[in-house]
Amino acid sequence: MEESNTRMTSLVPAEKLRRTCELRFFSFDSTEDLTPLEEGIIGQERAVRALDFGLTARFPGYNIFMAGPVGTGKTTYAVIKVNKVAQGQKTPSDWVYVYNFSRPDQPRALELPAGQGMKFRQQMAELISEVRSEIKRAFESEQFEQHKNGVMRHFQDLIANLWLEVDQQVKKKGFGLQRLPTGIVPIPLNPEGKPLSEEEFGLLTLEEREGLTRRIQEVQELLGEVLRKVHNLEKEARDRLQELERETALYAMRQPVDRTREENVGWPGVIDYLEEVEKDILQNLEEFRSDGGGEEGQSPFDGKAAQEKVLNRYMVNLLVDHSGTRGAPVVVETNPTYYNLFGKVEYRGSFGTMVTDFTMIKGGAFHRANGGYLILQARDLLSQPFTWEALKRTLKSGRLRIENLAEQAGAIATSTLRPEPIPLNVKIILIGPPLIYQVLYLQDEDFRKFFKVKVDFDTEMPRTEENLRNYAEFIATVCRRDGLKPFDPSAVARIIEHSSRLAQHQEKLSTRFNEVMELLYEAALAAEVDGEQLVTAKHVLSALEEKAYRSNRVQEKIIEMITEGTLLVDTSGRKVGQVNGLAVLELGDYGFGKPSRITAQTYMGKKGVLNIEREIQMSGRIHSKGVFILSGYLAGKFAQRFPLSLSASLTFEQLYEEVEGDSASSAELYALLSSLSGLPIDQGIAVTGSVNQKGEVQPIGGVNEKIEGFFQVCKAKGLTGRQGVLIPTQNVINLMLRDEVVQAVREGRFHIWAVSTIAEGIEVLTGVPAGESDRPGNCPEGTVNFLVERRLRELAQEYRRYEGEKD
């Protein structure tokens, strides 16, 4: 009974269809008894070591890229780990922008100790307020008025004495001085000391007239000299008054300014700035003396605005404030736009135009993270215009610049502020999928220069006893963090079994913690609905069933169409050249196995194996490769003594979407061998597995979904006890089937066969031995290979005969 022995030896026992988690590994009553994980991650030793290295390496270019699929805990671990490291590091400086008195369009950046920036801003506000008050009080004081009046009287006396002296000199020359709106005019006098009349002037001799003219010139020269002296005295008076005002203002502001200096000793930039503030105040004393009401002829509004414009120059723009930071800053920027990362200069409307000043400079994530760590999502970063190039440019220069985005876009440059750049010292942690890392590494030379540390996250970890306990602690961590009901050991065991199913491996656990956490939430909700205090295995199973039910509408419709006969899939009987193939249909949040009928027709010709899907461009490249492999297998197996004269067509019946993948290539080969040998295939057995040219069956993905999909179809049409699925032997380790399927196999109502070669598979499907031989053409009679070779020989002979008749 060779047929019976082959089918029996290929059967996979129920114990190998699912690896259960034994409760003996857990010594707790509930996860409430467990200690939560410190760093919130397990099973990522490689990634943990790489991140530790990256955070320790403080060299240029040693920024970090954390690569891994979504849901593996990259971001959560990065935030926890980086914060832990940052707590033990020095808190960086605060940064402020202040007015640049020499270059107003280039605001100055000042560095201050952590927490001092806010204090300095308050100090400057108090300083200006106090200086205004003191200056106003000083200039309104009686002492200042006395000094001022004394200076004015002194110079008035000097000028009066000068004019008195001049007046005497002019009188000696026979002239008087008349002051007119246009100036001072010398007037000739008669001997009585009165102005010379026209009649008296007419009686003068020529010699007397010439003497009068000469004396007028002398008087005018004298007046010119006196006017110059008066002008100098007036200028000296103004200078003395200004000096008095300067001395008064310096005395008034000395105490508050000196106090502010003392509070900022050790920071030369601040000391230099205070000196410039002091000089600028002395140049704008009028704004400190007045109430901003405006000068005569000027509206009070204009005067107030002008005063505020001057006083705003002494404000402090606190760009980076670390007063509440402990250790190095850790910034997670979830919306990495250009402005959010690098800061901006804001504008406000004023009388129909847009204006700005240094107080409207706003910092970005780079400024807040400077001296610490910046965590970004690579996909979000790359989707924003200008940000990637700006990031690389910033890393190259080592300085943070706040620039107009319009200039980055190549638009016409506009007049705006150009704040002084700030030195950059930040470690960037980019997080994204492996594909983005590979593309950037291959296509962007700068990426290799600036991101030298790769932190590679795996999607699975070994299912060891230690990791089982770690998984339980992970569940305890989530429960405590999110306020979930505690899980008992049976629930933890079910979670672990589901984790192995997610990993598609009995010896592995999934590290896609996002999907595991979804199950934790939904199982806890099921326990809450039942009014239970502990989450048990039944709640985990309920959560899995409910989640599947929410998403399996399409699967139920397909099964319904199969049972109605709309989709032709046989689950009983035997047919030649026909086999049930299996594929996984992915719907985003849900995937399931879908059986499809594969048929083969063989006939005389030279076309070889024809893939109908490929001919109509519905076949992907991998599937087309699989079909070409079939031709190689047939030629290597049966065309050693005569040429193949074969034409064959293969197709997926009632399939209206593109076919991709090679997991059905073994099923297609079984259909070809059945058609050539004339041996029918058991339609109650579905097939999955790829094949190589040597006839070895190769493993495939989605084995659990494929088996369960065909089981549901057989269950809907009626289980006969002869149905099952033929899988590659290598996929046995990947089996984590649902309880329902395992129980059906245990009861003999469903079967799983595992094969390593096409020879083993064809024996299971046809019940006839494959008939291996030690040399070509020596297959045992009645075996599959014997029948196939005989048919191929017949086709070759008929083809030669046909060609001979044509000639």
Image: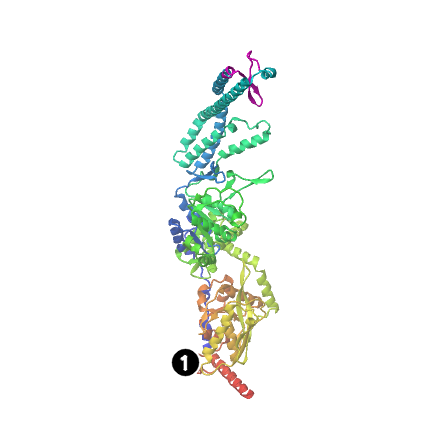
Task: Choose top left, top right, bottom left or bottom right for residue 326.
Answer: top left
Residue 613 locus on image (x, y percent): 56, 71
Whether 734 is drawn above or below 37: the answer is below
* Residue closer to the observer: 258 or 736: 258
Residue 274 locus on image (x, y percent): 44, 33
Residue 187 locus on image (x, y percent): 56, 18
- Label 1 sits on what residue type? Asp
Element at label 1: loop
**Total numbered labels placed on residues in the image:** 1
Residue 367 shows up from this direction: yes
* Residue closer to the observer: 32 or 567: 567
Task: Choose top left, top right, bottom left or bottom right for residue 190.
Answer: top right
Q: Which residue is mark 1?
A: 774
* Residue closer to the observer: 578 or 75: 75
- Number of other residues with Cα within 10 Å of mark 1, as a class: few under 14, some 14 to 19, many 20 or more: few
Magenta stretch: give its range: 169-195
* Residue closer to the observer: 525 or 51: 51
User: Is 319 displayed left or right of 297 in the figure?
Assistant: left
The image quadrant where one finds the C terminus is bottom right
Residue 43 shows up from this direction: no
Residue 420 locus on image (x, y percent): 46, 42
